[in-house]
Image (cartoon, rainbow, N blue to C red):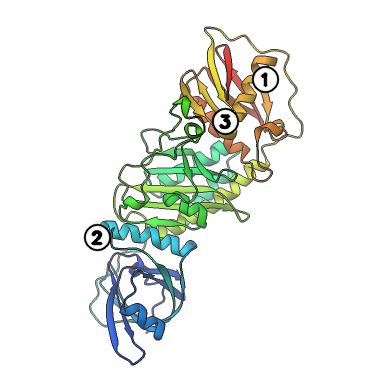
Amino acid sequence: MNKPTLGEIRPCLEGLIPAVIATAAADGTPNVAYISQVCFVDEDHVALSFQFFNKTRANILANPHASLLVLHPQTAQFFRLHIRYLRTETQGPLFESMKAQLAGIASHTGMANVFMLRGSDVYAVQEIEALEGSPLPAPPPRCGMLNNVRRCSERLSRCTSLDEVLNATLATLTDFMGVQHAMLLMLDPVNQRLYTVASCGYATSGVGSEIAVGHGVIGVAARERTPVRIQHMTTAYLYSSAIRSSLQANTPDLALDVDIPYPGLREPHSQLAVPIVSAARVLGVVFVESPHDMQFGFEDEDMLVAIAGHLGAAIDLMQSASEPQETVAAEPSAPPALGSALQVRHYRANDSIFIGDDYLIKGVAGAIFWKLVRNYTEQGRTAFSNRELRLDPDLGLPDVTDNLEARLLLLQRRLKEHGPMVRIEKTGRGRFQLMVQRPLELQEAS
């Protein structure tokens, strides 16, 4: 009978049932203890949670060999792993992923104030034994997952704009993965913040809401460039709202609320965040969540990683294909807008834009909008190009990975949510038009 592989028993390593570890001191005295986490690293390695300075820890440092007993959560089959301690990681992708997962286990078991990950102990798996017994029949394998990735790839290959790419990705998640709540976020590499550009399944879209890199499941996935998956609700990784804008901190006398509400579930029980990476650069994060426990297993994680890879390549392609070879000439005049004037205020402190008393956008997207409306009111211009925005030094676009297409899409969607009075519409490759239905009255503030 062939020995089982680590990949074949991977359901045992999902954290549903605590494992049992047996170690021995230098003099051979044995010790047996429960362990909260056993995580799959690759086909030859596992990682165990190091939480306490206890007898198990002392034994491992003195004698690196141990035995690990794990149980298949569906067949009740026991497996014994013979392992050898290699190292402890206290930072980086593996540590942060295990830290997030442990927070979910701790909250689920009422041990949130007890469980604390001190490190990820990495072990080489030397042998796996299937113990004798009468296991239950194995559930049928999940089918069609590779086909779902193929369908996503086919959908993305037909897209001709970033807007279509994001919509196709969300449709894939809902149609083929059964995801009901999802967000796509892009990274601002200068400010190290992620901003929501698309979502589905929420009462409000949350487009424009921001999360700092390193904050919660989404921010950790971006910072560490690793998937982060939680199977149980945890207060440690909840977002009560989007990160507050720096506007009030910089200009407290304004007393203005510029917080776009974060659209996430109030009490998510399962969460999975996967970084979008292309050419070794983090472009953003794909995030899915559910109000139910145990909704996203390792197969869902694998599928979402593959989808995020396709998405990253598509985003890069859209960025490179968005710029025409020439700029757009200034128009002599624009059709007259009718009705009372619409007040547009710009705050130089962080390029925040308000239309009337309502906050619209800030940052680079705010600077872009201010340029457009100034050109409109001063010159009557309505036609613009991506190229001229990239060449404008006043906009503060970074030299590398400016994500201009994503910023324009964010601005377009925020304007659409605000109302029909001011809109942006794409008119061709790297070209767009400012549509204004009422006269604009511009005000600049410090």
Q: CA distance from mark 1 to mark 2?
A: 59 Å
Mark with earlier residue (3, 1): 3
Type of amino acid under label 3: Ala
Rendered view: 272 above or below 340: below
Residue 234 is at least partly visible in this image: yes
Type of amino acid under label 2: Thr
Type of amino acid under label 1: Asn
Rendered view: 286 above or below 408: below
Rendered view: 300 above or below 258: below
Quick one: 249 or 126, which is closer to the camera?
249
Residue 161 is at least partly visible in this image: no
| Residue carrying label 1 | 375
Query: Residue 81 placed where, x, y %?
Result: 36, 80
Image quadrant containing the N terminus:
bottom left
The label shown at residue 68 is: none
Query: Residue 340 placed where, x, y %?
Result: 52, 7
Mark with earlier residue (1, 2): 2
Query: Residue 313 placed where, x, y %?
Result: 60, 50
Local crowd size for mark 1, using a 10 Å CA cut-off: few (<14), some (14–19), many (≥20): some
Q: CA distance from mark 3 to mark 2?
A: 46 Å
| Residue carrying label 2 | 109
Query: Residue 342 placed where, x, y %?
Result: 53, 13
Q: Residue at x 44, y 37 (%)?
A: 244
Query: Which element is circle 3 on?
Result: loop
Query: Which element is circle 1 on?
Result: helix
Query: Which element is circle 2 on?
Result: loop
| Residue carrying label 3 | 349
Q: Residue at x 55, y 19 (%)?
A: 344
Mark with earlier residue (3, 2): 2
Q: Are marks 3 and 1 in contact (CB under 8 Å)?
A: no
Image quadrant containing the C terminus:
top right
Local crowd size for mark 3, using a 10 Å CA cut-off: few (<14), some (14–19), many (≥20): some
